[in-house]
Amino acid sequence: MIAELTRRYRFSAAHRLHNEALGEEENARLYGKCNNPYGHGHNYVLDVTVRGQIDEGTGMVMDLGLLDRIVNEQVLERFDHTHLNLDVAEFARLVPTTENLCLEIHHLLRERLAREASRATLRRIRLAETNSNFFEYEGEGASGGERRTKGDGS
């Protein structure tokens, strides 16, 4: 029997939405208050969903301790209490939108889970930036082969 398991994690990080290839006016128009030169912070909520065969012996899709360790090492230790633009190499040249952060987290977790989780695979991540904005990513090949993020910008 196949099942999905979703586990929730939290971390805090700051960022500035600013594209060096654009002028100051265009950045201000495009990113608004998120273009503040000093940045601003969020308390992110990350939902990680894995999918796999339920183990007959344990009754679990995946060992929660292993999932927690992987998320802690790959995501929380890397991003928690950082300024994404200044402290995270991936965002030195990439605008640290929540969409891009979502893609990066998916990439980090997919590779690690593929190596260490024998039965479970990463199904999707959902990253909430605020109570009104969240983004989901299922990976390349999901829904007809397109990279996709979903956002609720209300």
Image (cartoon, rainbow, N blue to C red):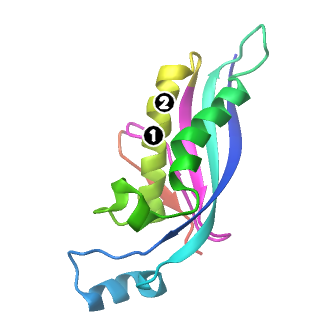
Q: Is residue 124 magenta?
A: yes
Q: Are marks 1 and 2 in contact (CB under 8 Å)?
A: yes
What stretch of residues is rendered in magenta? 121-144
Q: Quadrant of the C terminus?
A: bottom right
Q: Give percent across and percent down for residue 44.
A: 62, 61
Q: Residue at x 46, y 56 (%)?
A: 101
Q: Is residue 143 left or right of residue 91?
A: right
**Residue occupying image coordinates x 28% and y 63%:** 93
Asked if residue 49 shows in the view, the reply is yes
For label 1, the residue is 108
- Please name whichever residue, 2 or 65, is drawn nearer the observer in this view of the structure: 65
The reply, left or right, for residue 100 in relation to residue 150 is: left
| Image quadrant containing the N terminus | top right
Indicate the position of residue 115 as horizontal and vertical percent values: 47, 21
Task: Tell me which residue sits at (63%, 70%) in the image.
Answer: 130
* Amino acid at pointer 2: Arg
Identified by mark 1, the residue type is Leu
Could you say whether the residue bearing mark 2 is in a helix, strand or loop? helix
Q: Is residue 116 left or right of residue 23?
A: right
User: Which quarter of the picture shows residue 91?
Assistant: bottom left
User: Foreground: 12 or 45?
Assistant: 12
Q: Is residue 120 magenta?
A: no
User: What crowding class fits label 2: few (fewer than 14 Cα within 10 Å), some (14-19), or many (20 or more)?
Assistant: some
85 or 60, nearer to the observer? 85
Residue ID for mark 2:
112
- Relative to residue 112, is residue 117 drawn left or right? right
User: Is residue 96 visible to us here?
Assistant: no
Where 150 falls versus 147 (above or below)?
A: below
User: Which residue extends farthest top?
Assistant: 57
13 shown above or below 2: below
- State the image coordinates of residue 51 (x, y, percent, origin top left): 61, 28
Q: Position of residue 47 (x, y in %)?
A: 64, 47
